[in-house]
Amino acid sequence: MIESLSAIKLLVFARNEATGQGIADACRGADEVAPQCFVTTDLTRAVDISRDREPQAALIELTGDVETDRQSIRELRAVTPETVLVGVHAGEGDPGGVSLAMIVQLVREGVADFLRLPIPQRELRQLFDRLRPRGQSTRRQLGRCIAFMSNKGGVGKSTLAVNTAVSLASRYPNEVLLIDASLQMGVCAAMLNLEPKTTLLDAFQQRQRLDETLIRQLSIPHESGLLLLAAPMDPVAAADIDDQSMTRLLNLSRRTFRYVVVDTFPLFDQIVMTVLDIVSRAYVVLDNVVPTVLSAVQLLKLLDDLQYPHERIGIVVNRFQRITGNPSIEDIGRALRLPVDSVIPYSRRAIVAANSGRPFSSDFVRFSKLHRAMADLVASVDQVSLESPAVETSGADNE
């Protein structure tokens, strides 16, 4: 299940898989919103999960050997010092149990709480109650991450991603990152008239040393003030990029930029699943043509099956035209069983902009229906009314 907005993330580091799964099952049954549990028996993997997923708490099964447990605790604290460390133990006198003296030593290492196996659900609920306010009050503010997605190509998904990023960058220069995660056929660089020397593939190849500074170094600046992390130029090499690397990249990007805009590949694969797991809002893009609407219905059904929360989905009808036989906005809303959030009208201006490599958001046109609709979409992303860019010209779209 993909985590909901209020779900707690937990790392479960156990000595064997059965114990780890038992702890995870107890945690899932103790909370109204089942926590998202990452179970592992390997310390290196536990450190990677802690770095990539930033769990609110790590439940560590203690071995009874103080030096072994201290080493595990120190390594986990080093990568995510804000994660609450909880020691899980069998109790003094039991096989694998811990003594009071050992508990005192582990408290000094940073363990905040101890739970005895089998863990009573009452104690787990108390732990979760403590985690929620702590996670909200002490964690550093993360940037807002949004994605544009579709399971059908040719609907203008990349155009909306690029122009949204450009509009946000005009307001927040150098604080907006556009990630072209359409690994097999990325077009964002071409739409921005950029020739990137570094891409997502470089970030993947340097994933072990990837940090906020390196993300900025690998990103290509655009005159609008945004930075682009472009799709790989070699589709075959791009196939090596995995979901774990994408998770790390997105989480680091959220700590580095005010906004992260992600363009995705028009296929529901593991990379897209990873993006959906992290983004604040996923915009499903379609046009008002019957086959595309039916395709969007199938995509939303899949998201429903995955229990993806509706409040994190936005519906954007792009290139809207009032033509006899085409579905209306009301028809689309009924078919999708979700309200349409934004309607972007068909405009030749958008086509010319895509062909020229200069996003239409770069040149605001006061009386343009296209620009007004785009401004409304960006305002919903930014949650405030956007000011008009300084450069304005007169004129209207040739519909």
Image (cartoon, rainbow, N blue to C red):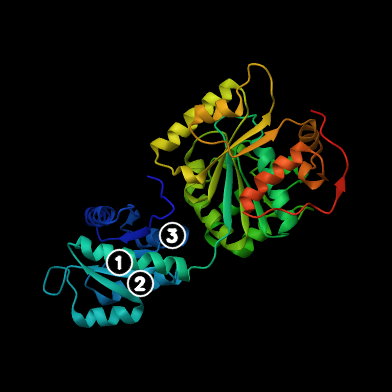
Q: Position of residue 247 (x, y in %)?
A: 50, 52
* Farthest residue, direction front: 330
Residue 87 lies, with reference to residue 333, above or below; the image says below
Distance from disc 1 to disc 2, alpha carbons, whole Å, reads: 19 Å
Q: Amino acid at mark 2?
A: Ile
Q: Amino acid at mark 1?
A: Leu
Q: Is residue 242 visible from the viewing direction of this image?
A: no
- Disc 1 crowd rating (10 Å Cα; few below 14, some 14-19, many 20+) is some
* Farthest residue, direction top: 325
Distance from disc 2 to disc 3, alpha carbons, whole Å, reads: 14 Å
Lower sequence index among marks 3 and 1: 3
Residue 127, labelled with which disc? 1
Q: Is residue 134 left or right of residue 281?
A: left
The answer to the question of whether label 3 and label 1 lie on touching residues, with beta carbons closer than 8 A, is: no
Distance from disc 3 to disc 1, alpha carbons, whole Å, reads: 23 Å
The residue where tag 3 is placed is 48
Which residue is drawn at the image coordinates 35% and 79% (left, top)? 109
Of residues 209 and 182, the one drawn nearer to the viewer in this rendering: 182
Q: Is residue 60 left or right of residue 158?
A: left
The residue where tag 2 is placed is 73
Which element carries disc 2, helix, strand or loop? Answer: helix
Q: Is residue 297 left or right of residue 357?
A: left
